[in-house]
Image: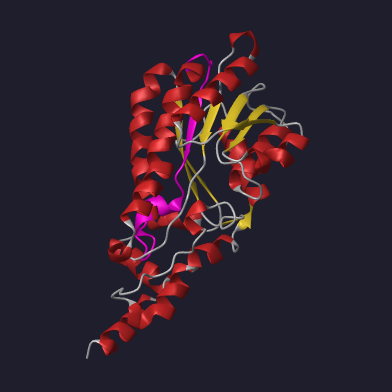
Amino acid sequence: MASSNRDRVSVLITGCSPGGMGAALAIAFHEAGHQVFATARNPTKLQALAERGIATVTLDITSTESIAAAVASVTSSLKGGKGLDILVNNAAGSYAMPVVDISLDKAKQLFETNVWSHVAVTQAFLPLLLKSERPVIVNHTSVGSMAAVPWQGVYNASKAALAMLTDTMRMELSGFGIRVVDLKTGGVKTNIIDNNNFHIEGDKLPEGSIFAPAREAVQKAIGQEDAHAWQGMTAEQWADEVVGLLLKRNPPAVVWKGSGAFMSRIALLFPGWVMEGVARKITNMNAIEEVIRASRK
């Protein structure tokens, strides 16, 4: 993909583990001729990108020390006092569980990763962004930020919180010439399970859950989020289209890409009960409720 909209820019992307959307974005920006800083907490996961000639930086977005070290590394790599042109806050975790069964510790950790860590990274790189002529901050919120879906409450709430902060930042930073983009992604084929710390032990209903009578059905529904990821467009196609939009001199405030993203956008025009019906159908709520009611007789 040729770099036709902007001259060569510098871009830092968090969460660039192999097979994920961050890595796909790093490759797309790099192939378009731009200076890319691909980051991940585990540097061994950046080897494939480094072999392509992409600069890699170790960055744990939940660690203030790691963030500071990454800023220092990027600053030294930007020659001539140049700034950072694009910051993509992409790293994230997921967690699926009925709200009444969530582990509060895991839920707080998820919000730390999906919300506050992005704020911390943005604050740390802000001085470099202010040195750019046309700085852009991209927060990856996903279509989950606008929909209530059973079992995905904590994850979608974290994305909704990030979306609200993104909209607020867009207004607050406009006077400084900083464009803030909400990247709402639908289904994309990625290694979400391999790259997601919150799935290491699996999202299993706890013993004593009120959903125990329908445990098998609920457990299957909880796993649907990962299954849907494999039904979307390829990460490469998604990244090429996203990068093309982000490189425009005036990138859109909201980028909708991925399988189902367009329909999610259209769904904003529908009454709430329509979206609730769709969410109930894809998570098999009617069948689950039948089992629950039968167990309570």
> As rendered, which of 26 and 182 lies closer to the eye?
26
The image quarter in which residue 283 lies: bottom left
The image quarter in which residue 254 lies: top left
- Location of the N terminus by quadrant is top right
Which x, y percent locates residue 12? 58, 30
Which x, y percent locates residue 35? 67, 25
In the displayed structure, would residue 211 be above or below residue 279? below
In the displayed structure, would residue 182 be above or below residue 294? above
Is residue 136 part of the magenta span, yes or no?
yes
Judge left or right: residue 76 versus residue 291: right
Which x, y percent locates residue 173? 38, 23
Judge left or right: residue 11 versus residue 130: right
Q: Residue at x 48, y 46 (%)?
A: 92
Q: Residue at x 37, y 45 (%)?
A: 111
Residue span colored magenta: 130-154
Is residue 141 part of the magenta span, yes or no?
yes
